[in-house]
Image (tube, rainbow, N blue to C red):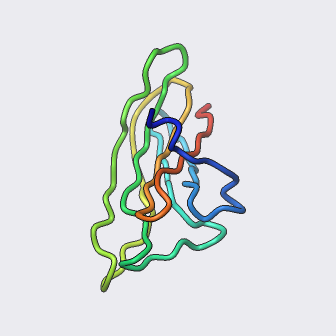
Amino acid sequence: MISGTIRSGDWKGEKHVPVIEYTKEGGLVKVEVQVGKEIPHPNTPEHHIAWIELYFHPEGENFPILVGRVAFTNHSDPLTEPRAVFFFRTAKKGKLYALSYCNIHGLWENEITLE
């Protein structure tokens, strides 16, 4: 199963874990996801983050919802940075999940609670 290949960890000690931060203003949620916040991730043609996805799993519902996906398609000049901002509207609580893909080290995830 693919779930067995997804890695996680402490983003302060592992450069591949996506860091999720959010703010709420009324019903609008702004979520920033970045890889390499504490320990910069290499960003070269040979070693890079290819994409980030953000999911929202509303409390009490069966399935998470894909909020968005950002692909980082250039790894030469200009160098793309593995950082994305998403906006969505909800009054619900739930979990935010972020997935990132490193071309060498595979899939990484993190989650936080959206209050």
Q: Is residue 13 above or below residue 79?
A: above
- Judged left or right of residue 72, residue 109 is right
Identify the residue at image location x=57%, y=66%: 36
The image quadrant where one finds the N terminus is top left
> 98 above or below 42?
above
Q: Quadrant of residue 113?
A: top right
Measuring 66% from the left and 61% from the top, which residue is drawn there? 14
**48 to the left or right of 41:** left
Q: Residue furthest left?
A: 73
Determine whether, in the image, residue 85 is placed left or right of residue 35.
left
Q: Residue at x 44, y 73 (%)?
A: 47
Residue 52, position in %: x, y?
Answer: 41, 53
Q: 5 or 90, which is in the foreground?
A: 5
- Residue 106, given in percent of the width and then of the height, sits at 46, 55
Percent of width and height locating residue 13: 71, 62
Residue sitting at the far bottom: 77
| Quadrant of image for the C terminus | top right
Across and down, in percent, residue 9 comes to 67, 50
Between residues 45 and 39, which one lies in front from this camera angle? 45
Looking at the image, is 8 positioned above or below residue 27? Answer: below
Which residue appears at 36% of the width and 78% of the height?
45
Count of marks, rendered view: 0
